[in-house]
Amino acid sequence: MNISIVIPLFNEAESLPELHNWIKTVMDKHQYSYEVVFVDDGSKDKSWQVIEELAAKHPEVKAIKFRRNYGKSPGLHVGFEAAQGDVVITMDADLQDSPDEIPELFKMITEQNYDLVSGWKQKRFDNAVTKNLPSKLYNWTNRKISGIQLHDMNCGLKAYRKDVVKSIEVYGEMHRFIPVLARNAGFYNIGEKVVQHQARKYGVSKFGWERFINGFLDLLTITFLSKFGKRPMHFFGLMGTLMFVVGFCTALYLGFDKFYHVFIAHTRARLLTDRPSFYISLTSMVLGTMLFLAGFIGELILRNSADRNNYLLEKKINL
């Protein structure tokens, strides 16, 4: 199979027939062997009914339905698990991503040997305040922290070599940072392509300013995990040891100072409990011990980690 198209969706019943017809037209024109994997993220409208109708008429349509709304990352995760094509294309279901971009994305993966190609919606038709501005701030922050120079890291239209999607785990809200996950997994050949952006035809956007805040926190998380996720003791153990040593040395100094004044100089010394440095040293040793234990527990968890994507699926079609 040449291409798997993975489409996570939530309440997009109106756009699905048009999207499928558009995809089918493009794929038949280029004579690709393909599948379309719809992942219904617990929609409350008639999205699943529409998908069932499409699957009954078109054998290339496959689908997964969640019992409730889990988010885009779990949708992509199970879609990647189900994908069988040599190249995996992801796109949103709101008709803002153009299926006409698929042939060129496919060529960039198969002929130019990219591991991942991310779309760049250079000209956008979204609301400038609620979506465009947060997106620009978000992508600028991404480039500065991650070091990956993509203009639109969160673009839903992406192409992947099959090995990439089978090697990464998309969980939580980490779909925003799939290029970072791919690089951390050893896939460094990441490209970008300017893609056409369509104005939303049906429904309303599910994202706004909160995406910037959540995305920034998630970026810090994935940056930390990429450096210390496989060796938590290297961070917590180091910080804990340093804090404990500083606190212990301070306490040792206070003890010797007390001993000198009482037994050698025979002068009256302040009570240790009257000195702020005593409490600082005590707090430092306690925090250092806690950080060291956190690193130790992190190592234990890492060696006994369970699958983080055990989501209950209600139905599957043709899988």
Image (cartoon, rainbow, N blue to C red):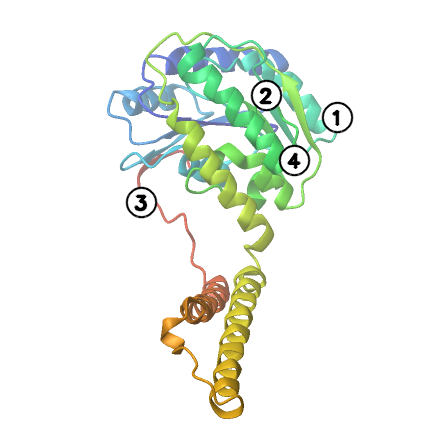
Give how far across and how far down residue 37 sits, in percent: 45, 29
Structural distance between the alpha carbons of marks 4 and 1: 26 Å
Compare residues 318 and 268 and report the one nearer the observer. Answer: 268
Q: Which mark is residue 312?
A: 3
Q: In the displayed structure, would residue 58 be above or below residue 233?
A: above
Structural distance between the alpha carbons of marks 2 and 1: 17 Å
The amino acid pointed to by label 1 is Glu
Give how far across and how far down residue 168 sits, in percent: 55, 44
Q: Which residue is mark 2?
A: 119
Give the side of residue 118 with respect to residue 9, left or right: right
Task: Identify the element where label 4 is drawn.
Answer: loop
Q: Residues within 10 Å of mark 1 (few under 14, many from 20)?
A: few
Q: In the displayed structure, would residue 59 be above or below residue 301?
A: above
* Nearest to N terminus: mark 1 or mark 3: 1
Structural distance between the alpha carbons of marks 4 and 2: 18 Å
Structural distance between the alpha carbons of marks 2 and 3: 31 Å
Q: Nearer the viewer's eye, disc 4 or disc 1?
A: 4
Quarter placement of the N terminus: top right
Can residue 229 be seen in the rendering of this structure? yes
Task: Identify the element where label 1 is drawn.
Answer: loop
Quarter placement of the C terminus: top left
Residue in the image at 75% along x and 26% along y: 112
Q: Which mark is residue 147?
A: 4
Q: Which mark is residue 224?
A: none
Q: In the displayed structure, would residue 42 be above or below residue 130?
A: below
Compare residues 146 and 72 and report the one nearer the observer. Answer: 146
* Nearest to N terminus: mark 3 or mark 4: 4
* Nearest to N terminus: mark 2 or mark 3: 2
Q: Nearer the viewer's eye, disc 2 or disc 1?
A: 2
Q: Nearer the viewer's eye, disc 2 or disc 3?
A: 2
Q: Which residue is mark 1?
A: 111
Give how far across and how far down residue 233 sits, in percent: 55, 64
